[in-house]
Image: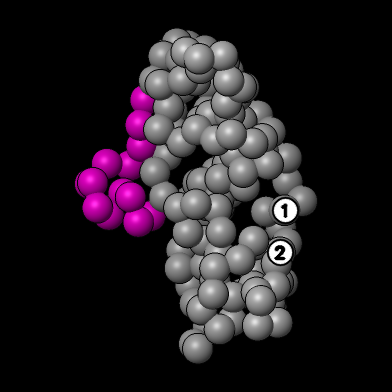
Amino acid sequence: MDEPTFDELMEESGYCLATDGCMVEPDGTCEHGCDSWMLVLGIREQQMRDFTQYVHEYENAIGETRYAVGEWFQERGQYICPHGAHTAKLTGCSGSFAQTAAGLPDTYESRGRALRRARYLFYEMDKEYQDFMSEE
């Protein structure tokens, strides 16, 4: 299998490709013993940064604790959640907006899964911004 691009590495679910094409955790190994491309390529930078500011806990209508992924903008009074490359390409939209965490499109049962999704979404966004700022 050819070396994938970063966008191809991470799926919308927060999982990524192993070197044989199986879906695994970003730091995982598949049932065939193949490591994720993230491990093989040594992509650790996003794992070391703190993305907890993008994970918001809330209780849904039936009392279950859920975790939403988005960035809160106080001055706008809303959350903003960028779309991954695949969703943006399909919809033509770069993100979603909501006034409550429950209104965000990316919600999860576990904080860990939400954090993985936040790393995927906001790492790329921060990287693009930093690249843009360094060009000036």
Q: For the residue carrying disc 1, how many other residues have a C-alpha within 10 Å: few (<14), some (14-19), or many (20+)?
A: some
Q: Is residue 51 magenta?
A: no
Picture coordinates of residue 117, whole percent (x, y)? 56, 45
Instruction: Name which of mark 2 and mark 1 comes first in the sequence.
Output: 2
Picture coordinates of residue 91, whole percent (x, y)? 23, 46
Residue 27's disc is: 2
Q: Nearer the viewer, residue 49 or 101?
A: 101
Mark 1 — residue?
A: 47
What span is in magenta?
A: 85-97
Amino acid type shown at disc 2: Asp
Residue 130 seen in the current view:
no
Up-down: is 41 above or below 100? below
Viewer-side label of 2, 1: 2
Circles 2, 1 touching at the beta carbon (< 8 Å): yes
Q: Nearer the viewer, residue 51 or 102?
A: 102
How many badges with numbers are in the image? 2
Q: Is residue 93 magenta?
A: yes
Residue at the (68%, 41%) spot, across then down: 112
Up-down: is 130 above or below 9? above
